[in-house]
Amino acid sequence: MTPNINSFEKHISFLKSGVEKALKNIPLNDTPNYLYDPIRYIINGKGKRLRPVLVHLVGHSYSADPEDLMKASIAVELLHNFTLVHDDIMDNDNIRHGQPSVHKKWDEPTAILSGDAIFVLSQLLLIGLPTIIIQRFNEVSLNICEGQGMDKQFENDTSISMGQYLIMIGKKTGALLGLCAEFGALLSGIKKENAHSLFEYGLNLGLAFQIQDDLLDIFGDESSMGKSLGSDISKKKQTALTILARDNNSEKWLDFINNHSKISDYQSYFDKNGIRSEVEKAVAHYIKKANSALISSPESDKEHLQKFTTMILKRKS
Amino acid sequence: MTPNINSFEKHISFLKSGVEKALKNIPLNDTPNYLYDPIRYIINGKGKRLRPVLVHLVGHSYSADPEDLMKASIAVELLHNFTLVHDDIMDNDNIRHGQPSVHKKWDEPTAILSGDAIFVLSQLLLIGLPTIIIQRFNEVSLNICEGQGMDKQFENDTSISMGQYLIMIGKKTGALLGLCAEFGALLSGIKKENAHSLFEYGLNLGLAFQIQDDLLDIFGDESSMGKSLGSDISKKKQTALTILARDNNSEKWLDFINNHSKISDYQSYFDKNGIRSEVEKAVAHYIKKANSALISSPESDKEHLQKFTTMILKRKS
């Protein structure tokens, strides 16, 4: 690790601790406990806070107002948590950030309602910010719903192309990271057209991030991930690896999945047939696209965001 | 029916058909079907559209801009439908507006996601309207979540007082009707303080409406309600009738509920012990409060809203 990256990571930790503090300071009613106990549980969860940090990172380069940045960044984190709580119900995921997910710790009605209220709280945080912020926030929220809808629709559908898959993860994961980068610029008063390259940065970063997630689900470090490997496959989710394996040789792939279920078999299949390396290339491709989108950004922004890209993609979980 | 009321009902039908048209004209993407098929099903459901009609009714008296009124009224109807879709999952209600509820026609994940997206669509409709509109919309959305949280928390809790019950239905049902009336005034540019009496009107109307709902669940006309009577009791929900019965004579009431389950037994218990008439008095009390809130409203507004009160409370289902 270079000293340069080291000081950058300190800066990120500083931004993250500001975000944590602001999350804890969101004014919340005490009761009803049925609603606010799970909300406090969600807000105090151990998220990486990558999205609000990205808002601040861009916003500082563009000299946006710090208070506005904090409101927008917290709103984005709440939006993200709202989607996690509801997705965890829909996908039957029982662990989130190393803890029982809300519907597991309480029940489904509690998780539905507290997710709803967290989304309302995110809207309330945006009150008073420019209309374009509120508009983009909700446009991207709709993208996320569409992405989740595609993801659910694609389950068990083995005819999904890589193109459809990329549209799905673009909506489900990419659009929100795009919004975060865009917010930093928009809050400095820059026009929407001129903030679009920041959205492109985040969108491509999100694609790289999600494809890497697919890799980690097969090749990750189980202990640091806090969940077992192969969860996408056991849920019949389409991933970059399974789609590519099918595209390369559908007969061989079908024969393989009908006769294997062990994660080590999947690992060696993806390794031997060049699927892993091709998917790793796709991650590199979207990282490059993300960084190229910054071509007309201020130098300080470019430097920070390229380090941010490196930082979040070197994760092991 | 007086000719006066008759022409008023024609006016309401006219407003309702405008709302139906605007609902059908909401620009929606075609795909993914997983998301948009249920959204179209929800929007085309047979709702009474009382809430958007109330927005228009007040808005016309205050000469608010018709386009703004339409956006706000449709947003309010979508908010209402979002809460119905999610509440139906939480409360295990399988019929809505005479049709299978979304989680029954599809499944819970579909209902969670399409509810979320309908709420996002409601936010998008408000873009460009004054900040106070967006703020009040989300404040009331949070009230509704709190009301539903109280309702869930109160299930099986036989220590709930009438006071707690009234706070719960005020948040769950009253606040949204309050918002509808308030919106009509706020969209004419009136200050928030001056629009508050309209909120009071809607809030009290909502209390009367909900208490009447409790009565209809026991004494209603099964065929026109499209559902069986006694559903609140079978779900152990607190209602004005059960709370009052317990308050009046808890020993007798406990003895009764431990030995009876037929709806006709409940009907005669509530009748003989004066519970029904006392609850009917409460409805009348909140109707009076609603109408008194209009004291400083323009004459045309007062007249319309008093007719509106009469109209929606004479329902049998």
Image (cartoon, coloured by chain):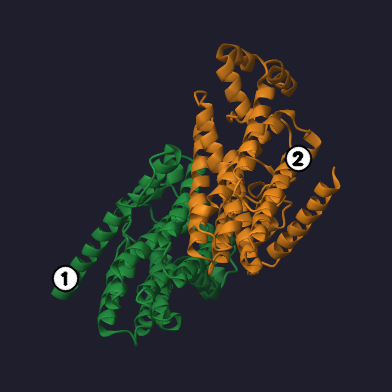
Chain colours: A green, B orange
A76 relative position to B170: left or right: left
**Residue A46 visible to the viewer:** no
Q: Check the image and name the residue furthest to the left.
A: A3
Q: Which residue is mark 1?
A: A7
Give the percent coordinates (x, y) of residue B249.
58, 14
Q: Amino acid at mark 2?
A: Arg
Q: Residue at x 51, y 50 (%)?
A: B140
Badge 2 local density, few (<14 within 10 Å), some, or many (20+)? some
Q: Residue at x 25, y 64 (%)?
A: A15
Residues flagged by tags 2 and 1 on a common chain: no
The alpha-carbon separation of the residues under discs 2 and 1 comes to 69 Å
Give the percent coordinates (x, y) of residue B237.
59, 31
Give the percent coordinates (x, y) of residue B145.
50, 46
Q: Nearer the viewer, mark 2 or mark 1?
A: 2
Badge 1 local density, few (<14 within 10 Å), some, or many (20+)? few
Q: Quarter of the image containing the N terminus of chain A?
A: bottom left
Any mark on residue B315, and which? 2
Q: On the image, which quarter does residue B310 sit in?
A: top right
Any mark on residue B54, and which? none
Q: Nearer the viewer, residue A284 or B184?
A: B184
